[in-house]
Image: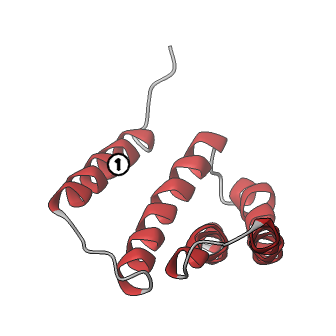
Amino acid sequence: MRTILFLTISNCFMTYAWYGHLKDNPPNNIKEIIALIFISWGVAFFEYIFMVPANNYFGKIDGFSPFQLKIIQEVLSLIIFAGFAVLFLQEKWRWNYAVSFVLIAAATYFMFLPVKEQ
């Protein structure tokens, strides 16, 4: 649970760092683009404060493989982004997004299936 909590917090910072500026008008010049880059890096710093312990400490203690950690991170990223896009960016939810998410959920199911070693 610690792993998932830290990955969730990390993904909230990541989503805002990567996509938070999309609500504003596009930058007008190189100075504004550079400012966006540095602001995003500053927000992403907090992403790493949670991502590194989630993967390298809690993930190992909780018994997740690197593949499982990656899948968990991607699923959380999509869930958080979907909420962010609809609530913050005011994007409309479409049926094909839901189908895509169901397929990713199916991939997650298969990632966690126990497999007998040969």
Q: Is residue 105 visible?
A: yes
Choose between 115 and 29: the one closer to the eye: 29
User: In the image shown, does 30 or 79 lie closer to the viewer?
Assistant: 30
* 107 sits left or right of 10 in the view: left
Categorize mark 1 by other alpha carbons within 10 Å: few (<14), some (14-19), many (20+).
some
Rendered residue at 50%/81% (across/down):
23
Percent across and percent down for residue 27 are 65, 72
Q: Which colouring convention does the figure follow? A: secondary structure
Residue 88 percent location from the top left of the image: 44, 85
Indicate whether 69 appears above or below 52: above
Q: From this viewpoint, is residue 8 visible?
A: no
Question: Residue shown at 44%/30% (left/top)?
Answer: 115
Left or right? Give the position of 110 relative to 46: left
Residue of label 1: 104
Amino acid type, mark 1: Ile
Front residue of 105 and 63:
105
User: Which residue is drawn at the image coordinates 83% and 76% (left, top)?
Assistant: 42
Name the residue at 20% across, 53% down: 99
Q: Residue furthest top?
A: 118
Q: Give the secondary structure at mark 1.
A: helix
- Does residue 99 sit above or below 113 in this rendering? below
| Image position, residue 96 (x, y; %) | 20, 54
Q: Is residue 69 above or below residue 11?
A: above
- Of the 4 image quadrants, the one containing the N terminus is bottom right
Q: Residue furthest bottom?
A: 87
